[in-house]
Image (tube, rainbow, N blue to C red):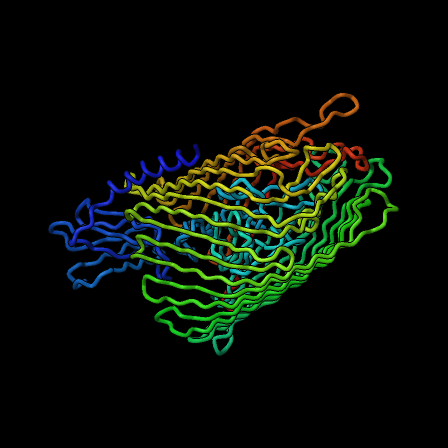
Amino acid sequence: MYIKIFLIGILWMSTFGLTYGRPVTSDIIFGTVKEANGEPLAGANVYWLGTSAGTVTGAEGAFRLEKASGATRIVAVFIGYMPDTLDIRDVNETLPVEFVLHEDAQHLGEVTVTERRLGMKPLNGVINGLQINQNELFKAACCNLGESFTTNPSVDVNYSDAATGARQIKMLGLSGIYVQMLTENLPNFRGAAAPYALGYVPGPWMKSIQVSKGASSVRNGYESITGQIDVEYLKPDDEPGADINLYGNSEGRMEANVSGNIHLKNKLNTEILAHYEDNLMDMDENRDGFLDKPNVRQLNLQNRWDRKGDIYIFHGGVGLLSEKRESGQTAGMGVEPPFEIGLKTNRYEGYMKHAFILDKQRGTNIAFMGSASLHRLDGSFGYKHYSVNQKNAYAQFMFETNFSEKHNLSTGVSLNYDGIDQHYNLNSRASALPERADERETTPGVYAQYTLNLHEKWILMAGIRADHSSLFGTFVTPRFHLKYNPSESVNLRFSAGKGYRTVHALAENNFLLASGRSLLIDELEQEKAWNYGGSALFYIPVFGNVLKINTEYYYTHFGNQAVIDYDSDPFLIRISNLNGRSYSHTFQVDATYPIVKGLELSAAYRLNDVKTTYGGVLQEKPLTSKYKGLMTASYKTPLGKWQFDATLQLNGSGRMPAPYRFSDGTLSWNERFPAFEQLNVQITRWFRHFSVYIGGENLTGFRQKNPIVAADRPWSRQFEPTLIWGPVNGAMAYAGIRINIGRIE
């Protein structure tokens, strides 16, 4: 049924797009519209001067325009940029033509416009997804990666529990463990780092985020099942200078971020990134005797280098992180001993990339990339204890070339190693003896990926890789993508692919130790799943502006899955292999339209149908909203001095794990959680070398009333802080300042 509805919608809207596009004849002018930095401008208006004949650029900034009788000049226009005019008598039959639009900084006075490109725009290639730039990140405080998806309709972020502060993303209705995390195309934040990784990437460090959906490229490995999130940091070769970001909120959280880069001699550049955060207050809004959020103290540093020559390019860097999380009971609750939670993390990492350009004209190059990390976590959850020391090493050698303008080949070999040493006590007894479990996996692999590009109208990408796990043997990962542009105003994409994942159950779910339930982990097999999807993107001229509409549907089904079962036993959490069916259907539609100059509105709606077999019964996946609605409004005044941003989220209801009854006959919790809304607002005042912002989150004030079950009995089996479906805090206000110090050389 879902596939039929999606295909009917695509056919109807494709027909609309085809009727809008003029038929291609021999009297056609075609080309592209770009920014000064070479980035394509999607949704730009291109028309014949003095006529009403025109068109709109597609996702890659491309256009086709039939010649108009008597007209000789073409104009390209985009909001925020100065228009450009081309006289076809100067073209001399040389096609394609190219418009280059420059930012309109006229009369801006004290305002310095550093970036005016779209905050969120579709990925240019064959893979469906979005690129989130700094313009979008600046619409909210974005203190870290986990808080950077507020205005994104495709990615949900919520707390995994009300004790440790672990945050988890969801994409296509499924847990974030099925999204492959990358930092600048290198796999990162695996195993023990996964539960808290969203807090390890400070927002002011990020230059952009690429979110790809469904089956991704085989070049980055076999682990992507529902998509990839690739974080691009600020670059050492960016404009020399330093930036400072200071932030504070009404919950006592304070942050300081510093980034600075220096251009040295011989094309060598270096960069320092620094982050410090601390919580100065204990928050217990519902007065249940437990902190609503942990007090987090984090120091995060990176030093990055690059050198770009004509033949050889180098990137490299090192980083360290030290974090302490403290949570549990507040003072004076009368429970002895008090239930306390403490997590200490130390992480060290480094990376390097070497590229050798063999033939610049054909894009022929060889490259070597490598990374290594050491992640140590010591955690206590009452009497339970978990300590892990994880070592990861990754290396990839790749070759890429364009045989012609139509044919591209990328091939390579990779090697991944995970070594996880674990000591733990899963019993709520002080006298329990610790146990030990070590995990080792070495996985070499080889891949090949072919891309066929027929004049940007048809793009086909097919990839396959074979890997050999020291634990699970050899397995093959096929992936396929197709993009079709029936006209300049319509982009269609289809994808299919398989993904695999090794489960590190205790490392990835250590926050479950906060529960009073017993934790039982079966011997787990490798997870595997197929993902199929399609999307349709439309650029429709409406009242002189461009309405952008995107529709998409994805289906994921598992051959095997590690299932976290709360339902079968009220006093047990069991992680076991799938015994039945598990799948996800996701349908989404979103639209963006600039109402007037400077004001842009967006709206989105997503429907989730996610089910898994628990205890032999196929049921809705618990703690997953059935739907989500999102509306955003962003307005920037004509001179660019003021910016106003608002986001309204509507999160649908969903199923809770099966409740049980207390001794007095009352249910431990309701069988379903209700729908709820959240409103975030921010105001920014831009100056020449700094900006000031104030805002509020969850201004509707909604919060989950009792996020911790049996909070007055933390040592009992009924104690449960891990069933989080909504915000645990009410309205919060914040303020901050961003300062640009200027050039450093």
In the rendered image, is residue 296 in sight? yes
In the rendered image, is residue 376 in sight? no
Percent position of residue 647, x then y = 49, 39
Residue shown at 82%/42% (left/top)? 428
Percent position of residue 67, x then y = 16, 51
Q: Quadrant of the N terminus?
A: top left
Residue shown at 59%/48% (left/top)? 527
Q: Residue 444 is drawn in which quadrant?
A: bottom right
Percent position of residue 618, x then y = 59, 32
Q: Nearer the viewer, residue 340 or 658?
A: 658
Specify whether 497 is left or right of 170: left
Q: Nearer the viewer, residue 201 or 18?
A: 18
Specify whether 278 is left or right of 70: right
Toward the top, the furthest residue is: 665
Residue shown at 36%/36% (left/top)? 9
Toward the bottom, the furthest residue is: 266
Q: Residue 374 is drawn in which quadrant?
A: bottom right
Q: Nearer the viewer, residue 215 or 627?
A: 215
Q: In this view, does 380 lie above or below 473?
A: above
Toward the left, the furthest residue is: 70
Q: Nearer the viewer, residue 674 or 297?
A: 674
Specify whether 662 is left or right of 35: right
Toward the front, the furthest residue is: 473
Percent position of residue 222, x then y = 54, 55
Tag count: 0
Q: In this view, does 5 lie above or below 175?
A: above
